[in-house]
Image: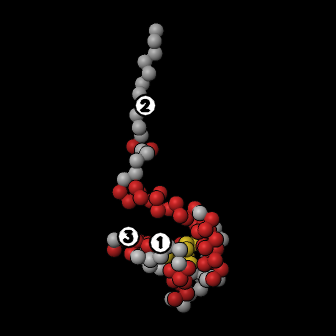
Amino acid sequence: MPRLIKKKRERWWARSQKTGRQAGRKEKSKFYHTSRWRKLARQILIRDNYLCQACKRKGVLTAVGEKPRDHAIDHIQAVRQGGDFWDPHNLETLCAGCHNRKSGKERHQA
């Protein structure tokens, strides 16, 4: 007897099409995987002595780790607000906490 082949249903959590804010995320993040960005990020870490610049402005010295989840090289003026992506003067080292705080504030302003 022939077998009935069921059509696989697409799972809601595995959809290939992203919507909303995630739609442009892949396009924006492609620069962060280039060797040019990694070299620039390393230069910024060395320039800032592996210290969070936001904490330093508050008078607290917070060292950031080597692993990417321990720190962020952040644009001082957001690129979507006219900041230059590759300008080292528009970049600073932030600890994970300060980066999350700053990103959250920027998201609510947008």
Q: Where is residue 68 in the image (x, y as percent from the top left)?
A: 60, 67
Reading the chain from its start, which is encountered first: label 2 or label 1? 2
105 to the left or right of 30: left
User: Does residue 24 appear in this view?
Assistant: yes
Q: Between label 2 and label 1, give the one nearer the viewer.
A: 2
Q: Distance between the residues labelled 2 and 3?
A: 37 Å
Q: Which amino acid lies under the numbered mark 1 shown in the image of this protein?
A: Asn
Contact (Cβ within 8 Å) of mark 2 with mark 3: no
Tell me the quarter of the picture where residue 25 sits: bottom left
The residue that mark 1 highlights is 100
Q: What residue type is labelled 3?
A: Arg
Can you say whether 84 is above or below 24 in the image?
Answer: below
Residue tagged by mark 3?
Answer: 107
- Identified at 36% across, 53% down, the residue is 19
Q: Looking at this view, is 63 or 46 the one in front? A: 46
Element marked by disc 2: loop
Q: Report the Cα–Cα distance between label 1 and label 3.
A: 10 Å
The secondary structure type at the circle numbered 3 is helix
Q: Which residue is drawn at 40% across and 55% down?
A: 23
Q: Nearer the viewer, mark 1 or mark 3?
A: 3
Marks 1 and 3, the one that precedes in the sequence? 1
Q: Which of 21 and 100 is in front in this view?
A: 21
Measured in 3D between alpha carbons, the distance from the residue under mark 2 to the one under mark 1, in whole angstroms, is 39 Å
Above or below, 43 against 26 in this view is below
Identify residue for label 2: 8
